[in-house]
Amino acid sequence: MKVYNVAILGTGFGGLCMALRLREQGENDFLLLEKASGVGGTWRDNTYPGAACDVKSHLYWLSFTERPEWTKTYCDQPEILHNIELLAEKSGLKPQIRFNTEVIDATWDESQLLWRIRTANNETVLARNFVPAWGQLNRPSFAGIAGRERFQGAQFHSAGWRHDVPLAGKRIACIGVGPSAAQFIPELARQAGHLTVFQRSPNYVVPRLDRPYTDDEQRIFHAVPATRDASRAAIFADHESWYDAMRLDTPKAAEFTAMARAQLESQVADPVLREKLWPTYPIGCKRIIIADDYYPALVRPNVTLETTAISGIEEQGIRTKDGTLHEFDVIVFGTGFETETLLGVSDIKGRGGKSLRETWKPVPEAYLGITVSGFPNLYVLYGPNTNLGHNSILNMIEAQVDYTVRALQAAKAHGVAALDVKPAVMAEFNRQLQKDLQGTSWAGSCTSWYKHADGRISNNWSGNVIDYRKATANFRIEEYDQLRQAETASA
Ligand code: NAP
């Protein structure tokens, strides 16, 4: 049976980046497994109206591939997805993608030193190296609100938008006000007869100042591609400087807080509404929302901001804890994603049958967010502690992909069949990481998907992108147990 050198799970930015980098290195012995019928990952799944990226277009792309000709300063989801599809098409990767193939589990075969990856189609794929690239935000959460099944109207989650449900003139509820909801609330407000937004905690909102590129700009970007590179570099530097706003009590945090307050005061006149919309936790603790149209949507006459907690969902609508029943035709869940274990539906079993799902309870940990002790030749993309609050996640994915490529090269050069990060190396990395994270705003007084109930920050990286690039720049084989065929670990 065919044994691939690398099996990649997912064809979002992570999976495609991995495949393209492998190919650049002359490695063509890989297969991509994709549960859906198309590429694009999160940009394929999130089609809600208003979906867009809060990182500027010129930065939001893989650094080493041809740059798209973006039409706006901030790219919208359809344009991003279109460009990802073009990338997959033009790069000729498609024949190496097995679509409609959901991975249900992957097990490390200790005698053969390879991964046995089972799919929902009852196939087994064998690969020496396994690169899960399923992202951190792929399982919609309905926030455990009781009674959802009782509701007689239409209901859906932001990541499964029901474009067939008519919204015009309807009584619509939106639960949640996170970055996804902040993007679709203006669209719902435009269409709804009445929109009620259920807010549990407010967010900081800073200006976006999005606009289409002018014809002249587009002509210059097209004629002189170096101008697109220069724009990218400037945006990257600007975003890196935002990192200081992700640390508690810094001048940058004060600057961002003042910017958010000015935006609130200029867009919301009613002092009662203003105070409902003003957070009490430090800026950056939850993701900062970059939007110009969010507050204007909330002050429309057909929109109500409801801050009374929800007690449950009933046949006719949502009951709040004060006993009021709010009646609706449609409920939209902007309630985010299940992120606690970082795993998708599938489990991964490493040495001695050790389950990654169990290993990652209560808090997932990895070395550099990429390798996990006891799981040889497993390279996770966008794994634990690799999320950012200040810059494009694609920078982090590229660093992880490059580290993985170096690991594969090192294994080959040393004649090693498999590499397993040493437990002490991983433990020391995570001890230091949690210590470094203590000064960040994510450690502040808020709840967020970045951290576990016990306060450990499981999703975010402690530094900026340049720090992460430095941390992953060298693959040190001495940090790994080296496995050779027909023998157990040797140092
Ligand atoms: P999210 O940030 O987890 O927000 C979920 C929202 O639902 C929060 O407002 C939360 O309130 C609320 N909620 C949960 N349970 C609730 C309940 N029982 N009652 C009332 N409200 C409830 O999810 P998201 O907006 O989908 O965003 C997730 C992540 O996706 C973002 O952090 C970001 O990384 C990514 N994203 C990125 C972009 C982009 O432009 N790049 C766009 C969209 C999303 P609490 O705050 O009180 O928990």
Image (spheres, helix red, strand yellow):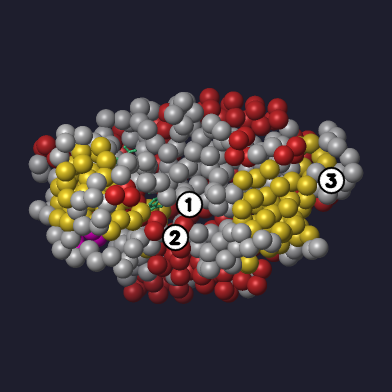
**Mark on residue 45?**
2
Magenta-colored stretch includes residue 396: no
Q: Are marks 2 and 1 in contact (CB under 8 Å)?
A: yes
Asked whether residue 225 is in view, the answer is no
Q: Nearer the viewer, residue 358 or 215?
A: 358
Residue holding disc 1: 138
36 above or below 450? below
Mark 1 or 3: in front is: 3
Residue holding disc 3: 111
Horizontal side of 24 relative to 1 (left or right) equals: left
Which residues, given as a range, are shown in magenta? 187-192
Q: CA distance from mark 1 to mark 3?
A: 33 Å
Q: Where is residue 132 shown, x and y percent of the image?
A: 62, 51
Q: CA distance from mark 2 to mark 3?
A: 38 Å
Q: Earlier in the sequence, mark 2 or mark 1?
A: 2
- SS category of the residue bearing label 2: helix
Pick out the residue farthest to the right.
486
Q: Where is residue 383 shown, x and y percent of the image?
A: 57, 44
Q: For mark 1, does the 10 Å Cα neighbourhood hold few (<14), some (14 to 19), or many (20 or more) residues?
A: many
Q: Nearer the viewer, residue 421 or 47?
A: 47
Q: What amino acid is at disc 2?
A: Asp
Q: Where is residue 26 shown, x and y percent of the image?
A: 75, 64
Q: Nearer the viewer, residue 167 or 250?
A: 167
Magenta-colored stretch includes residue 189: yes
Q: CA distance from mark 2 to mark 1?
A: 8 Å
Q: What amino acid is at disc 1?
A: Asn
Say which quarter of the image contains residue 25. Answer: bottom right
